[in-house]
Image (spheres, helix red, strand yellow):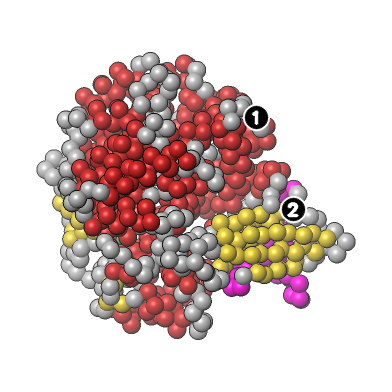
Amino acid sequence: EIYVEHGKEDRCAWAMDSLKKSMRWDEEAFGREYDLDVFMIVAVSDFNMGAMENKGLNIFNARRVLADPQIATDADYERIESVVGHEYFHNWTGNRVTCRDWFQLSLKEGLTVFRDQQFSADMAGEPAARAVCRINDVKRLREVQFPEDAGPMAHPVRPDSYQQIDNFYTPTVYEKGAEVVRVLHTLLGEDTFRRGMDLYFERHDGQAVTCDDFVAAMAQASGRDLTQFGRWYAQAGTPRVTASGRYSAGEKRFELALIQTTPPTPGQENKSPLQIPLSMGLVDSAGRDMRLQLEGETDTDAATTRALELNQTTHTFTFVNVETKPVPSLNRGFSAPIRVDYDYDAQDLALLAQHDSDLVNRWDAGQRLALARLLAATDAFELDQPPKVDDLLHQVFAHLLADDTLAPAFRACAVSLPAESEIAEACAIVDPIAIRAARLWLRESLGQSLAERWRALYETQRSPEPYVPGVAAAGRRALRNTALAYLCATGVPEPLQLARLQLESADNMTDRVAALSALVSSNAPFKADILVHLARDWAHEPLLMNKWFELQATAIAHAGEVPVVDRVRVLMKHRGFAITNPNNVYALIVSFCASNPAEFHRSDGSGYAFWAEQVPALDRINPTVAARLARTLERWRHFTPDRQRLMRAALEQVAREPKLSANVREIVVKSLDAG
Ligand code: ASP
Ligand code: ZN
């Protein structure tokens, strides 16, 4: 049963469908049945989180329930399916077996995110679609969790202290927690992992337990000593594996040397080696997988992907009968939540990006190639020099786009550039304005050089059928809208008209939002009129107004336009906005501070002044959300010195507020104290 506000009953079909799929999946994949006669969901419009798994009656944020093609995008449909699944799966991992104390939050959250990721992959079905699911998990981890793990709020998956547990509903507890369960799944294999889960439920049904109890059940079922594995729960920081290869043509040997380190994090100076399953392959110069035979192995089985198990600081693996010099493909499928360094040259990356049989690494190689170009361009913009054009990346993207055997959804991922936050993570000192300039420049140059292809894709990926949600159709829309975005990034007027037409004539919100997003960040003279019109059309529907707010809060401002922060201030007075509504605050205020770095970090400090006003104002209304907003300054030490000074002053100003909640106080104090 799903309960919604009157008049919204016809927007529940997708959530209901997702719930039925979830119930069936948990029976099939984990042998878990539902235990009551009724299962209810209630959707509410004012809710801090996505949803909460209250037994028998899940409470949902309306945005994670309501969907029809006129209000929900493909991404919304996907998210609704995964959140409905997530909350339902909590019935076993969260409710029947729950946490002994809050330090164990990941016992239920990491495990349940792992379960909902497996569910989404199974619903996606075929291998390319599963790979796209995995790529999206990896992206999220890199864009949000890696930065957290490198900043003052870095904490282990099982935190060892907290002031406000609300502040620990974090990407580390959720997403890294899920990766840690996945590491176990990889180490033990599907069947043993399942036996471990069965034993966990059998032992602990009706109890409140710990992460150690979970690992103990897995150890018992597998007969393995998982003591070292337990460090994944205790050590903060993103582990780094530095790999180097040496090929001897005479001996036909390839030596792969691997060194693992985990950087110090606040309160944890020294780290011990972790147990890391490193899935890998070797690729020949034609892009084919080579057979992997380790020295000392007599019987060569034909495996072309193997999981190397690391448990020491250093390892060397020697492969024999390697006919030609290989390029290693490391951490296939993102088998561990780590950074991998290897001294690839651009040609190696181009080879992997075009041929790696592992689609996650194929995507990753293209990202590495693009990232190298983006970093070079960022440096150039900082020095006011023109960046250098690189044909190789253009060739690789052209090759990927032309490959019709690749699923459209995969092609869309493969030609998307790393996010600004990922580029920032790779910089020693962050200048968000140079990063944005670099990313816009590369988009423009790819938009121009591949213009013919983008135009062709825009036509061929068009669907004559009415909108249906679902992986295959969504993939075509994603590729087509990627093409539109690149065309619009060139700044010439003609594609902007295409976007306008799409906005006006599309039968679904995915295509409309994609068109609007391109227009809002363009210099189209008519964009203001369009926004005014849409506000009228969308005024009756808060979920649409949130999209309207968010697109403007995260927009690019062109020379001569008002800074986005001024626009945000005006929008806060809009009658569709209430600071008491968490979805409104996320859409307008948090998304500006968290997801529009070049505007938030304007060198005049106007973004920080805004932050310093909003955090205390919001804190008086909703400390949980205020603390989320407060976190958008925590990485202040990572930025240029002039920005550091301004950010520190803003943090100190908020810290001096007499009546701060414990939530916000914890964030600002830790941000000022820790490195
Ligand atoms: N436990 C919820 C979830 O992750 C979040 C919350 O506490 O509201 O599903
Ligand atoms: Zn949860």
Between 213 and 384, the one nearer to me in the picture: 384
Please give the range of residues in magenta.
Answer: 286-312
Q: Position of residue 75 (x, y in %)?
A: 37, 43
Horizontally, is 90 left or right of 373 in the view?
Answer: left
Between 145 and 43, the one nearer to me in the picture: 145
Question: Is residue 575 positioned above or below 46 on the image?
Answer: above
Inspect the magenta stretch and tell me whether residue 288 lies in it: yes
Between 377 and 224, the one nearer to me in the picture: 377
User: Circle 1 is placed at which residue position?
Assistant: 389
Give residue 260's quadrant in the image: bottom right
The secondary structure making up most of the magenta span is loop
Question: Which mark, residue 284?
Answer: 2
Q: Which residue sits at x=40%, y=63%?
A: 155
- SS of the residue at dot 2? loop
Q: Position of residue 625 (x, y in %)?
A: 25, 49
Q: Position of residue 451 (x, y in %)?
A: 57, 24
Question: Is residue 595 positioned above or below 266 on the image?
Answer: above
Question: Is residue 301 positioned above or below 140 on the image?
Answer: below
The answer, for residue 164, to whether it is visible in the render is yes
Q: Which residue sits at x=45%, y=52%?
A: 147
Horizontally, is 113 left or right of 273 in the view?
Answer: left
Question: Is residue 410 positioned above or below 326 on the image?
Answer: above
Looking at the rendering, the quadrant in which ligand 2 lies is bottom left
**Amino acid type, label 2:** Asp
